[in-house]
Amino acid sequence: MNFENANTTILLWDMFYLGNPHRHMYKDIKHLPHIYAQAWPYFLTLLVLENGLRLWQRKKILRLNDSITSMSHAILQECAKLFYRGSEHCLYFWIYNNYKICELPWNSIAFWYFSAIAVDFCYYWMHRASHEIHIFWAQHQVHHSSEEFNVTVGVRQSVFQSLVGIVCYAPLALFVPPVLLMVHQQLSLLYQIWIHTETITTIGPLDYVLNTPAYHRVHHGSNLYCLDKNYGGVLIIWDRIFGTFQDFYPDKPITYGLVYQKNAFNPLSLQFFYNLNLYYKWNSMSGWKNKLRSVIKGPSWVPGLSWTGHDGRRASVAGRRKKYDVKISYALKSYLLVHFIAVVNGYFTLTTIPRSEINFTCMAISTFYVVWSLTS
C-alpha cells in the first residue's frame, strides 16, 4: 500500500480508535485530511443511536435546546480555526525541525501505536492543566457547562481549547513527527465523543485500561467527589497512576454542569462569560503575587490553601438541582431545528471552499454570518 497517499476516508470504526492504522499513516502534512470534519455523518449516527437507546432504557430523549447549543459550540470552534488553524502547532514544528533527537519512521506500526500512547499521555496533562490552572479553566469550562451528558456534549468545545495544549505536547516534538501528533489528536477527539453518554455503564475488563462513559460521567460531575477527577482521554491508566482516578458509583447522584451554573443557551455567552469571573477574582486579590496565583492556580484557590483548594472549602453541588430550561412550542422547536440545519449547511459550504479561492474579507464576513445566525 502507498502510505504516502493513504486512504483518507473516515469509517465508523475510527470513532472508537479501532480503524486500521495503515489508513492513517501520512508522510507529511499535505496528505493529512481534516478527520474531525469528515466524521460528522458518524457523529449524527451516534446521536440517533443514543436517542434510540435512551427510549429503550425508558429515559427522556435529548433536549433540543441543549443539544443545539452543544453542536453550535463545535461550529464556533471550527469557525475560529479558519483564522488560526496551524498556529497551535508552530512551536511543535519549530522544536521538531531544530531540536529533534532522531527521525523515527512515520510508516511503522509499532511507532504509530507508541505515538498514540505518547499523545494520550500528554493529553492527560493538558486536560489536567485545563482544570487546575484558572486561566485555562476559563476557556475549558464551556465543555462542562451543559447540564446534560450525551454525545452532543462531546463536541461542545472552547474556541481556544487547541491553543491551551501548545506547551503540553511540545516535549513530543523531540521525536514524534508533527503529522503523527495531528493524526492522534484528531482520532483521540473522535474517541472522546462516544464516551459522553449515560446509556453505557461498562465495557467489561476494558474498564481497567480505557476511559469509559461511566468514568467520564464522574469527570463531568459538579459534586465534590467528582471534581478534578478522571482526566484521561483514551486511556484511564494515567489517572490510576497519578492519583486522579475516581470510580463510578451508580448509587451516588451526579449533577452535571458547572458548580456556579450559567443559565443560558447562547453559545457566545457560554464561551466567554467565565473570563469575567477570572478578572473579578484577580481584581479582588491584594498584592501582585496573589493576583498572579489567582490566575495560574486552581479555580477554587484562595490565599493560604493548596493549589486547587482544600476539599473542605471548595464550592460544589451537594445533590441534584433543577435544570435550566426554556419552554417553547413545538412549532418554534421545529423552526429552530430547520434554522440550525440551514446554518450547518452554510458552515459546511464555507469550509469546503479552498482557502486559495476565498479572500480574508469574504471569509470573515461569511464566518460572522454563521456566528450571528447561531447566536441571534
Image (tube, helix red, strand yellow):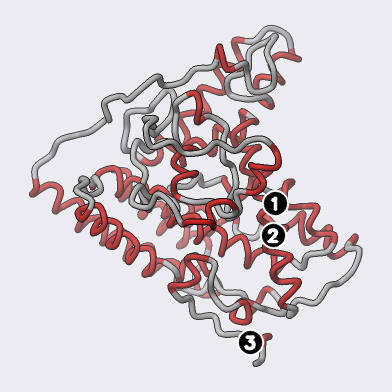
* Residue 62 position in % (x across, y down): 25, 48
Distance from disc 1 to disc 3, alpha carbons, whole Å, reads: 28 Å
Q: Which mark is residue 5?
A: 3
Residue flagged by tag 3: what amino acid is it?
Asn
Amino acid carrying label 1: it is Phe
134 to 10, vertically: above or below: above
Task: Name the foreground residue: 353 vs 296.
Answer: 296
- How far across and how far down the image is residue 234, in percent? 58, 55
Q: Report the residue marked by disc 2.
A: 117
Residue 34 in picture, x, y percent from top left = 54, 69
Q: Quadrant of the N terminus?
A: bottom right
Q: Residues within 10 Å of mark 1 (few under 14, many from 20)?
A: many
Q: Earlier in the sequence, mark 1 or mark 3?
A: 3
Element assignment for label 3: helix
The image shows residue 56, relative to residue 10, as above or below, that is above
Closer to the eye: label 3 or 2:
2
Which residue bears the numbered disc 1?
Answer: 121
Residue under the point 69% across and 17% down: 306
- Where does the image place residue 96, in percent across and percent down from the top left? 83, 62
